[in-house]
Every structure is written in C-alpha cells, then in structure tokens.
Amino acid sequence: MSFTTDESRWSDVWLAAAARGTTICGDFLAATALALALQGAGAGGLAVSGLLLAATLPLVVLAPLAGRLADRTDSRTLLVTIGFGQAVICALLAVVEKPVLVVGLVALLACGLAVTQPCLAALLPAMVRPADLPRASAISQTAVSLGALGGPVLAGLLVGQFGTRVPLLLDAATYLALVVAGLLLRTRRGGRRPVANPAAASSVAVANPAAASNETAASPAAASSEAAAGSRAVSGGGANPGGTESEWRLRRDPLMLVMVVSTAVVIAAIGGINVIEVFFIRETLGGSPTTYGLVSAAWMAGMLPGGWLAVRLARRLDDDGALVRGVLATLAVCSLMVLLAATVPTAGVLVPLWLVGGAANGGENVFANLLTARRVPEAMRARAYASYGAAVQSGSMAGFLIGGALLVAVPPRPLIAGAGVVGLLVVLVFVPVVTRAVRRSSSAGLATPGRPAEPEPAAGDTVGPWLSASHARGSGTSSS
C-alpha cells in the first residue's frame, strides 16, 4: 500500500513515535527498578500491587476529565506543560525514600499520563489519511515496543550497579521528549485552530464526495476517512458508525462497547501476572535481576513483529466486526501464553512464550486503535481513547488487587495457571456476545461491510504505524 500524504505530516508520525518510545523506555526503566527495589527490600505482593495501583488509578478516575481536556485544549500546550511537570516529578522520585512519598509521586506521574495518552492517541489519525493509519499505528507501536524492550533490560543492569536513583533520573530526562515533540509537531488539535491536515481533507472531499455528504454512507470506514483526514474538524460533524459528534456515546456503539468490555475483563483476569511475575522469576525459578529484565523485555520484543503483522491482516478485514473478532482472538493468545507460563521449569523458557504473547498484544493494539479511529468522530477521539484506556486500566487494577491479595496465601505458579485459564474462559464467554454485537450493528446500519476508502493523491503530495499499551502484559493500550 502506497503512502500519499504531505511530507511534513509524515515526519510528525515519526516525531511523535520517537517521543512515545523514549518516554516508554523511561517508564519501564523506572517501573522495573521500583519493582526490583521492593522485592529486594522484602516487600510482599501487596506492596508491589499498591505501587502499580498508584500508577493506574488516576488513569481511570481522571479519564472523563482528561479526555475532554485533550479534545478542547491545544495539544502543544498540553504536551509541553505536562512533559516539564513529569520530568520534575521523576527527579523528585529519584531522591525521596519514604514509601508514602514514592507512591504519591508515582500517582502524580499517572495524572499526567491520563492526559498525554489520549492527546497523543487522537493526534495520530489527524496526521495521516485513513488508508495510511494502520501502518502509522504500527510505526508508533514499534517505537513503543522498542522503548519498552530497552527499559527492563537497562533496569536489570543498572539496579545491580547503581541502585534505583540512576534509572529514575534517566526516566526524568526521557519526559523531556514530550516537550520536544510538543514544540516541533506541526499537527495540532484541540483549542481554537484551523484543521490539522487541510490538504488531506481536500483530497478526501474530492476523492470521496459521497462519503462527505451521506449520513448513512455505504462503508463506515469511508465515513471515518473524513475524520482521520480532518474534514470533520471543518464541518463539525458528519457520518460516523457510532453517531455524530454531538450524539456519539460508547454505550450506543455495540462494536466499540463489546471491544472495550471484553478487553477490560480479560485484562482483569490475567493482569495479576504483573504483580506475580517478579516473585515467580526471582523466587520460584531462581532468576537474577538481569534475567527478570530480559524476560520482561521479551513480551515487548514480540510486540514489534505483532504490530506489523496486524497491519497486513487489517487490510484484509472487510468490516469493523472483523476487527473486533481480531481483538478477541489476540486476547485468547495472550491468555494461552500466560497459562503455558505456569508449566516452565526455568525462567529462560518464558522468553518464547512471552514473544508470542507480545506479538498478540501488538496486534490487539493495532486492531483496537483502527476500530476507534474508524468509528469515533474526530472531535471526540481523545475522549474515546481515554474511555478505552480507563476500562483497560480498571481491568489492570482489578488484576493487581487480586494477584497481590492471592499471592499472600498461594504460590506464584498455580496463580499464573489460574489466571491463564480464567482469561481463556472469558474469551469463550465473549464469542457469542461479539456475534450478537455485530448483528446489532448491522441491523442498525452501524457496521456495513466494505474496505476503507483510499483517497487519491492530492496535487503536490509525496508518495511515500500507537496505541496505549499500556504496556502491562495483555494490555491493549499504550501507556505513555
């Protein structure tokens, strides 16, 4: 598939991806260092789950406010201001020692992430045309995976040599990448500003005038092509599978709703592994801090090819219902890998399992991102991404609490096995739910089969892939 977009807009994709990858590397560096420090100090599963909850709760509680703020405030202002604030908080985190202060500062960092995540997520569809969005998402996903891949490895090496202070100071420096991106990105959204990509919007209007005027367009992807190219920002509305800007609600869109709920429930089932893993590798399997870092990095290494494979597959998915089924299939693979992890005799055997699980996670991220960009009006995308992120993080928090509480009484190995089994059972339960949601959308005219419209190149264009991951195991949204 060829790229047809303005050169400066395409450079924005790379710039935003580089900023996300850099900050993700710092986040994983700090998270891994803090987890190792707690385990090394004799803290139990509840202490680790408490730290993870501090990093997650603001993403859930602040989601409605943060998404609205990201939609209504200049993206440059948000990225620069919050990036500076997070750098300062990380610097303070490197010098404080009291656990209460550490938890409080981690929670403050998460408050910033609650805004920057949907802000960056909503910027990506405004940078490229809908035909380019899967590959643009894969570029962003690759940057996130590379950052998450390097963070745990660096932490495993640095904690043994220098303790936690150096990794935390490095994390503070990485947040300056958000500031640089905010200052240099040409694409902007939110606030009172002209459309971010007028050239692409013009080309869509010329190439697909029917989609621009028909409230019940034959293809939902064709309708959402206006949104990704920016034409909805000019018109203030338009055709969309989930409704117009003024009336779109998650609960009114069956496909989006079932995608969000199924992902959150599966993550709640298997999310406890984030608490259990450090004890499983270090105590049950006898792995070193370096081994723990390498195993953690394997999941992110798998996300690299997974995202690009999903791009190729997304071109063959004829409708939005197929994307939802793709999300469910990738969640099943993640759960299966968690179940198989309970059988390993040594930590090294986890690596191939985590590579496959990470590949599935990368594919899930791309499918979910593409579905959201297709079905949500441009002016409300940050709110949609924030709502999706909040649901995912709510599932993660439930997993943290369950895993931390059960780890007090149950050894790590049977807990991991139980998490994998429950995850697979949840996927099986949601298979008929997804089928009914596809039928409801089709009967309501909200999910019409058909490939995305591919606009013709605009004059002067140069012919030339994001999401939040979070980046907990099995998480479907990127966290940076």
Image (spheres, grey):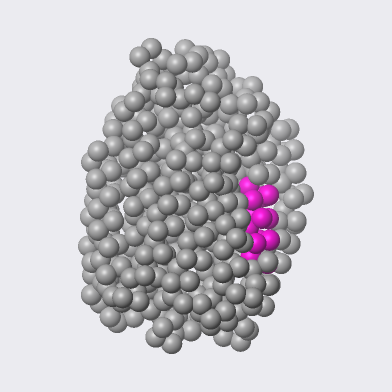
Q: Work out whether 283 lies above or below 62.
A: below
- What's drawn in magenta, residue-wise? 327-339
Between 380 and 303, the one nearer to me in the picture: 303
Q: Can residue 117 be seen in the rendering of this structure?
A: no
The picture places residue 129, in percent across and down from the top left corner, at 46, 27
Is 331 colored magenta in this rendering? yes
439 on left or right of 106: right
What count of labels does the image hold? 0
Q: Work out whether 35 lies above or below 354.
A: below
Residue at 42%, 24% (x, y): give it. Answer: 464
Between 136 and 248, the one nearer to me in the picture: 136
467 on left or right of 98: right
Q: Quadrant of the C terminus?
A: bottom left
The picture places residue 429, in percent across and down from the top left corner, at 75, 57
358 on left or right of 169: right
Residue at 41%, 37% (x, y): give it. Answer: 124
Between 150 and 208, the one nearer to me in the picture: 150
Residue lying at the far right in this picture: please name it: 432
Q: Quadrant of residue 241?
A: top right
Residue at 44%, 40% (x, y): give it. Answer: 139
The picture places residue 327, in percent across and down from the top left corner, at 63, 47
70 on left or right of 57: left
Q: Quadrant of residue 235?
A: top left
Is 236 colored magenta in this rendering? no
